[in-house]
Amino acid sequence: MHELHRAEYLSALGVTSYMPRFLLPLAPEPRQALLPVEELPVENREPPPGTAELQLRQRAEGPPEIAESPQASNTALRDIGALAEQMRAAPQPQPTPAELAPPQQQVQPFILSCWWLGDELLAVDSREPGAALPVEALFNNIARALGWHQLPREQDRLRWPLAENRFGPAAAASDARDTCSSWLEAASARRPVKSIWLMGRQACDFCSPLSLKQPLAEPVTEWNGVRLVAMPSLTELLQQPERKRALWQLLRETYPEHTRFPNSGAR
């Protein structure tokens, strides 16, 4: 057994020292183990001969160059090329539709008041919640000026958003446009009319049919044989009475057969 192993075994057994007095049968000849030499502290060491000359020569020549074998260089290049191929072949993460889509425009709540006058007109008026103005009287004056005040009348109201949630975010403009335009197309199909008035910003932006692609850009547009007319809301006409003149001029150009009376006009 090696002397170091024997010393470790004896230490584990609690034996301080053991030495056989005679050679055991079949035992190998004993040999003295080479014990480690205790290293002296650094300050007490003497540099080996020639060390100072070697250090001076290394300082003069600079750091030694590391020689690289051509085989090791080729292996490194192959590894880099394989890694680049793996990166090109790996599927790149695709952006989700939510990341590609532009930020949604939020829409504040609004109300659409609707009037049907026989088979002549469907008027959609934009209102702000809480505004108390005599819009009904103004609309009756406009209908009287056109001679439609005696036609059968039906009235409805559409609130946006359909289900208001005070704790949730405001509804998006795209949702408002899809809902209001679909409602207008269904209402005109259920009860056909000759003209549709879109009165105010919300009515023009969100109620124009989706087949037009864009909100009304011109005051008068044809859609499936129906005349679409964009005009100010009744609230705007009451708050800015000077705009009534331009509206009456638009009605005279659009409905010359109904506005031929010189004394007729919206008041």
Image (spheres, grey):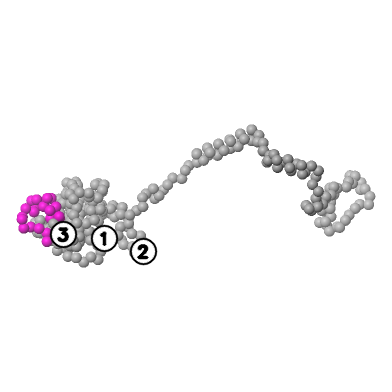
Q: Secondary structure at mark 1?
A: strand
Between 97 and 117, the one lying in front of the other is 97
Left or right: 79, with 21 as reference point: left
- Up-down: is 210 above or below 74? below
Q: Which mark is residue 167?
A: 2
**C-alpha distance separating marks 1 and 3:** 24 Å
Res 192 visible: no
Q: Write down the residue under mark 1.
A: 110
Residue farthest left in this picture: 262
Magenta stretch contains residue 248 = yes
Identity of the amino acid at label 2? Answer: Phe
Residue 10 x/y as whole percent: 84, 55
In percent of the image, x 19 and y 62: which residue is there?
239
Res 249 visible: yes
- Up-down: is 14 above or below 45? below
Residue 130 x/y as whole percent: 25, 66
Q: Residues within 10 Å of mark 2 (few under 14, many from 20)?
A: few
Magenta stretch contains residue 195 = no
Say whether disc 2 or disc 1 marks the residue closer to the N-terminus: 1
The range drawn in magenta is: 246-267
Say whether disc 1 or disc 3 marks the residue closer to the N-terminus: 1
Q: Residues within 10 Å of mark 1 (few under 14, many from 20)?
A: some
Left or right: 75, with 85 as reference point: right
Disc 3 versus disc 2: nearer the observer: 3
**C-alpha distance separating marks 3 and 2:** 40 Å
Identity of the amino acid at label 1? Answer: Phe
